[in-house]
Amino acid sequence: MAVRQSVVKVYSCFADGMAGTLSEIEVSLSPGIPTFDVIGLCDSSIRESRGRIRAALISAGFTMPKGHITVSISPAYMRKSGSAFDLPIAIGMLLASKQLPAPLNAKIYSEGELSLKGEIKGTPGSALRLKAAAGADYSMVIIPEEERVAAASVGLHGMTVTHLSNLDNIFIYKEYVCEEFRNEHDDAEDVPDDESIDIAVLKGQEKAARAVLLTAAGRHNLLMLGAPGCGKSLAGKIVKGLLPPLTQDEWSDVYSIYESAGLFDQQDLRSVKRPFRCLSPGITVSKLIGGGKPLKPGELALSNNGVLFADEICEYGNDVIDSLRIPLEEHSVRIDRDGVSYIFPASFIFVGAGNPCRCGMLYEGKCKCSPMARRRYAMKLSGPFLDRIDLFCEMRNVRTEDLEAIALPEEMRESPSLRSRVAEAWEMQRERYSGLGKGIYNSNMDSDSPAEIMRADSSVIKAAAGAAGMSGFSARGFLRLIRVGRTVADLDGRQDMKPSDISEASLFRDSHFINV
Amino acid sequence: MEYSDKNLTDLMFTAMRFSAAIDRKCLEELSAAGAITDYRDLCVDIDKVKEIAEQDDISERTSERLKKIVNEHDDIRRRFDGYLKIASDNDIKIISSDDPEYPWAWKQLSGMPPVFFCKGNTDLLKKCYTNGAAAMVGSREPSYYGKQATVDYAEHFAERDVVTVSGMATGIDRIAHSATLNKGGDTIAIVPGGVDVIYPPKNQDLYDAICNRGLVLSEMPPGQAVLKQYFPARNRLISGLADITMIMEAGQFSGTLHTASYAASQGKDLFVLPHGIYSANAIGGLYLIRDGAEVIIDKETIDDRIAECLVQRLGQTDVPGNIEDLRKIAEEEPDRLGEAEWKAVIMDRLTAGPKSFDELSGLWVIDFSKLSVLLQELEGNKLIGVTEGKYSLTFQR
């Protein structure tokens, strides 16, 4: 007796950490006692799709196929979760039961969650999944209308649907239209950020203003120490206001991670902007590096391409400070779980702010701490952590004598004009390091011959060696001087570095911590 | 090489000095008697010299020597021609006490040559003044330990941009020069014979290297062969030019001890590298330590001492003009001030107490990067330091 079994294959994808994995969904329909099994290490969110699919099919005017239904989702050895498999499973069942005619030799990609009424909805992580799908070659791509922006951000072309009954048009009336989704981000104006603060508030604190500018221009890490209320908490927001708008690549990265974390409204593109994440002393390690089930990116990954601002950093737990160390060095976060390593990109500008001592008045000359207490306070930030900070700067309360003297040249007053200088500096860096890879700036530039690439001649190296020797720097400290010096030159628009760049860079070394 | 009239007169004087033994004593006597105002007077007019020699108030000793100048004038002339040829063939520069290049340190001492000869980069003489200089001298046959310490300290000076001074002999001298040059530092060799005379001859390579990037200097006329008795006199120039003198290794009867005693009498700080008591070749150094010389233990002490010398001289004399005027210029026309003037103004401000970067930059209209360079250099020379985020003077004056 011939077995009247029919098997249909539909393609889909699931996201795990920051990677989308393509999967094949096979739907087998054979005569027998009506059953409906979904196999392939699926969690309950996928197994529950049976109920949604059954109801949705009926709501859309189809019938639930009668017989033995087995759905297998590959790769079978990986754990999967999420409700985005609803639509591909439903399509597979409709094709297998011949309720819809199967197009010849068609590779169908699909994803989407079904409601009981048959509506098709988007799910978080779509940008990651569609990015993986964009790399493969499919003849039909059917995705929820809500994922239009995500598809545009990764350059995937296809057709959007809102209801299961739309499938009639596609398969019966052959009205599949491959649409090239347009990225509306391209048209979005560069709206000034109302949260950011102008650098002009640092009037009279030239050193701090310069530190903030260098931080933005070279994507360096900054630590600001000062008395309570002197405005160091503003530093992060000032840095943010100096950063140029997101490039297309950055936009896509930021979009996909925020989308997978479900952190913004999919339709409001203006909410996709350069990240600014603010930490406060209560933060836990898992919130910082990410975790949960399913895996959610932590603050470090969410700060990628933006600013991570740590307020009152001296009050953080040691474990939090230590968990910042490797991400600051490697510009990525790694989470090991169930034998799988998840790597999230985390290339951000770190801005820390804190008090120099327990009473906070050290730089005001009114410190009431005992030398021992001061020492203990400064020891809260570990040496290896401080070693990864490029710029240190102290801040003071603005005093009348500072207010009288405004030595800043006129054109340096406002953030907007500085912002374009920062953009130029970034452009110089991208061009210089284009041979080394994407997303390389002065702060994370790593090479066997840094001097050559950064165009530092022997006089600059000598100056850096001299300055490094003077304050007992480590080898990393030496490189740090050259990196910051390079940013000084970039802000000047100079191709070659000169020794005075090093002098300026060494102004921002961690003298406070060395002196204790 | 082109020479000015002044250079030629100086060369003539050198010839007279050698031929007729006109020493410092003679010159002092003549100027005390009002017969001459300047040593060059002797070189201009031979009849005048004759006249002076006849004067009653001149001692027998001087009078004889002056007569010798008159009688042996042809011989002096020949010497002069010989010197001139060697000097111009070898690009030797002639520097006298009224030239701007003349070392500041020598002007502070008596018995330093009014005229000297050199080959190489004369800017280093100014650098001795602005960045400090350290003399490193010692045995011709040093122990491994002595060599090691010499290399270590010479390289340290090269990194700190401090000039090293030595005598281009074999052993410690050679190591001090070459280690400094290898690290890209500046070095001055003060040789016992003429500037063109390489002694010992096997140091030809070192001589070439120093002429190229450093400075070779001598008070002896060009072409003068090396004689044993010239060494002690040469040693006084080494200790005189440097801020501190470091004895790296010296036996009990070593010539290096001359340098040590000159340094002591010139009021320079003397540092001795401590060796074991069983190394006979270094026992002279241990005796110096017993007599009160300082011991080389760490580089910080040495750096601090050089810095202290810098503070004293840069603080007092380098200000070209009056500090009151400078203060006013800094406030009214800041562009007119040069680097040295700015440093003086900054240090002047810091005498009133510690100031932060922002406070300093608020005082004048000065570019951020310019101020940071000035502060960095002052800090590098250990003239100022940073505590609790504020700059202050390292040594209160």
Image: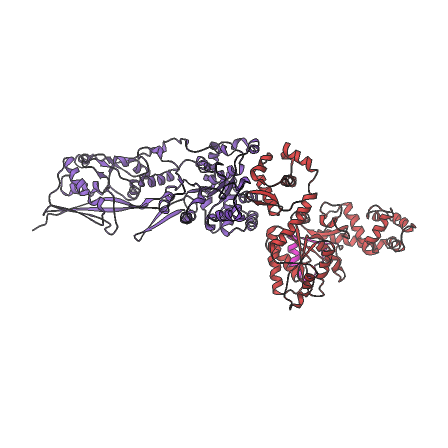
Q: Is residue B49 left or right of residue B389?
A: right
Q: Position of residue B349 (x, y in %)?
A: 63, 39
Asked whether residue A102 is in view, the answer is no
Does residue A250 sit above or below B23 in this rendering?
Answer: above
Q: Residue furthest left?
A: A1
Q: Nearer the viewer, residue A18 or B121?
A: A18
Q: Position of residue B10 (x, y in %)?
A: 78, 49
A242 in the magenta segment: no
Q: Nearer the viewer, residue B304 or B58?
A: B304
- The residue located at (69%, 46%) in the rendering is B313
- Chain assigned red: B
Residue B254: quadrant of the picture = bottom right
- Chain assigned purple: A
B204 in the magenta segment: yes
Q: Is residue A293 left or right of residue A492?
A: left
Asked whether residue B138 is in view, the answer is yes
Residue B355: quadrant of the picture = top right
Q: Is residue B280 left or right of residue A180?
A: right
Q: Is residue B360 left or right of residue B106?
A: left
Q: Position of residue B9 (x, y in %)?
A: 80, 48
Q: What count of labels does the image hold?
A: 0
Bounds of the magenta span?
B195-219
Q: Position of residue A197 (x, y in %)?
A: 45, 33
